Every structure is written in structure tokens, then in C-alpha cells.
Image (cartoon, rainbow, N blue to C red):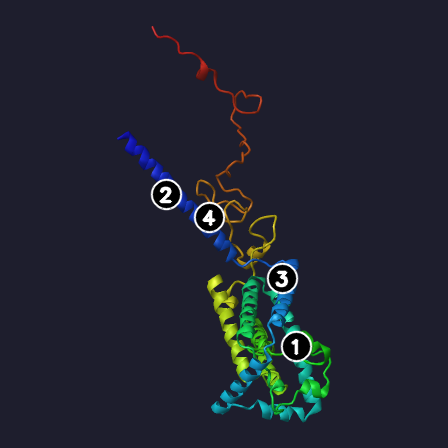
Amino acid sequence: MGETTVTTLEGRHQTAAHPVEDRTGQRLLRRLRTPRRPRLWFEILLIAVSYWTYSLVRNAVPEQKSEALRNADRLWDLERQLGLAFEQSVNHAVNSVTWLVVGMNYYYATLHFVVTLGVLVWLYRSHPGRYAATRLVLFSTTAVALAGYYLFPLAPPRLMNGGEFIDTVMVHETWGSMASGDLKNMSNQYAAMPSMHIGWSVWCGLTIFALATVPWAKVLGLLYPAGTLVVIVATANHFWLDAVGGVLCLSFGYALAALWYGSKPYALPREAPDGGGGGSRYGGGWSRAFPGRGFPGKGFPGRRGTDGAVAGSDGGGAGHTNAGVVSPRAPDDSPGPRTADGAPAASASAHAPDTPRH
């Protein structure tokens, strides 16, 4: 019987170790999935490295010119069959107004980066609790787009055979565009599907619309991706189906962020616990996000002592002492002799030996 008992105890020890490991893994996963206050140096480094990697991978995709041109012809034929091949009409109409088309060329070359970075900075400063989840949407959207560039090389309308579209950048010699001059040799010209101009602009627009507090900002948030769609079509840099591809990539990004954080990015708390090392695990960000909510042992108002009594804001409680803290002795005004520390001395009769009875 004793041998059976030992075997049972060993089995209990072995089975007891697994829940501990499971709980450790769950705590680590929960910590990774908890939004934390972003750190500036890390975010700058992450954005710089990510964009460098994106550019490197995008431009490393082989420029499959013949296949890209064939795919462009197929896409153009599909739009014609759908009765929605309007890109050429918009392209020629805008090209007839010089100041408008030049403005659109600069819009295409600059706002794609400026607005996206501006929204990231705004999120970092004003919505730190939602920053990581919203950034994950942007980064995962871009990662999926890289796969699209490799799997479906596509020539933009301005590079199609036949000369039906006008390359507005080349005609009007727009400075700074990656599609003009020597810069076009530094960028993959046959990576048009999906359009990240649309993916990023819709991300910016939805973020501004969801989190801005003033009506005019919300309106601008919605107008920005709409204006971007007009620009990419008018400058013959994309088909409108490229825009659909960008929105599909963005949908994947939002789905991934919602699964990882267990909530829509914009529904997360505005503030978040501090993510830096040192100090309390629950920094000022958490107290701002959840005012009045304390944690045991952290000195927050309203916590409970070991005996279940509610402690005061200074750590004390009426009629109770905190664990490990010695309360000062209450004064005793009773008459009689006292010891060296001021306590009443025990009466002589209390310590006198019992008198034997006769």
C-alpha cells in the first residue's frame, strides 16, 4: 500500500507542474497582447527599419515586365467588360488643366508619406493606448502588399503598350516623383497591385474619422482617401481595381489586430500602462486610463488589508494596522507605577505567589 501511495504522490507532482507552466505561458501571452505606452526611440527605429525593409523587398521583386504588361492588359479588359473602364477619360481630362495635374503629381509623391507619418505621431501623442494596435494594422497591411507585388506583377496604366494613357509625371516633369528621372530606376515600376496609396490613405482616413473630436477633422479624414483615389487614377499610376486590392489588404490588417488584441483598435482605452523598464509595472498611463482603480500592494486608495478591512488613502485604516507596520502605542492615563517605556506596571498582587491556605 505504501508503494502505491508513493506512486500516486509522484503522479500528483508531475501533473501539478503543467498548470504552472500553462499559467506562465498565459501570463506571457496576456502581457504581449496588452497595449502599452509606446517608447519614442523604439517607434522611430521600428518605423525606419520597417520602411527600409519594405522598400528593399519591394524593389527586390524582379521586374517581370512582359508578365506585368500582360496582366495590365487583362485587368483593363476586365474593367471594360464591367463597363467601369473610366481611368483613361479621367487621365485625359485632368491632363488638360496644367496646374491641377501638377498639383496631383506632387500630391501623389508627397502626401502618401507625410499624412501617414503625421497620423502615427498624432496617435503616439494623443492615443497611446490605441497606438500599437493601429500600427499593427498598418504594418500587416503593408506586409500583405509585398506578397501581392511578387505574386501578381502589374504595370500601371501609364506604362501600358499602345499609348492610350498619358504619363503626367513625364509630360509635366514633376520633381521628386519615384516615377521620373533617375529615381524611376530605384523603384519597382511594375508593383501596382495592390495600391498602398489607397491602403495607407484609407487607414489614415478611418483613424482620423474614428478618433478625431471635431467634425471638420472627421470630414477631412473621409475626404483624404477619396481624393487619393482620384489622384492615382488621374495620374495613370493605378487602375481602380488596384485600389480594391489595397482595401482588401487593409481589411486583413484590421482583422489581425482585432484577433490579437481582442478588440477593435479604436475601442481600446485611450491611455495605457507604461511600457518602459523600471518603476512600477502600473505606471502613470494606467492610472490615467483607469482613474480610481488600484492594485493590491501598490499603495492605491481603496485597497484592502490582510484582514479584509478597507485601508485609507494613506495606507492606514480605522481600528486596523497595515501588515508589517507597527502602530504607536496609545497613551494610557491610568494611575499606578509605570515601566521604563511608559507602560503601566503590573500590580504586585498579579505576580505574588499564591499564599498557601490553612
**Mark 1 and mark 3: span between their CA atoms?**
21 Å
**Mark 3 and mark 4: span between their CA atoms?**
28 Å
The residue type indicated by label 4 comes to Thr
Q: Say which label, 4 or 2, has the lower sequence index.
A: 2
- Extreme residue in the top direction: 358
Q: Quick one: 198 or 341, which is closer to the camera?
A: 198
Q: What secondary structure is found at the residue carrying circle 3? A: helix
Q: Quadrant of residue 40?
A: bottom right
**Mark 3 and mark 2: span between their CA atoms?**
42 Å
Q: Say which label, 1 or 2, has the lower sequence index.
A: 2
Q: Position of residue 94 (x, y in %)?
A: 64, 91
* Residue annotated with mark 3: 46
* Residue annotated with mark 2: 15
* Residue annotated with mark 4: 24
The answer to whether the residue labelled 1 contacts the one labelled 2, judged by CB atoms less than 8 Å apart, is no
**Mark 4 and mark 1: span between their CA atoms?**
45 Å
Query: Which label sits in the foreground, 1 or 3?
Result: 3
Q: Quick one: 206 or 153, which is closer to the camera?
A: 153
Query: Which label sits in the foreground, 4 or 2?
Result: 2
The quadrant of the picture occupied by the N terminus is top left
Q: What secondary structure is found at the residue carrying circle 1? A: helix
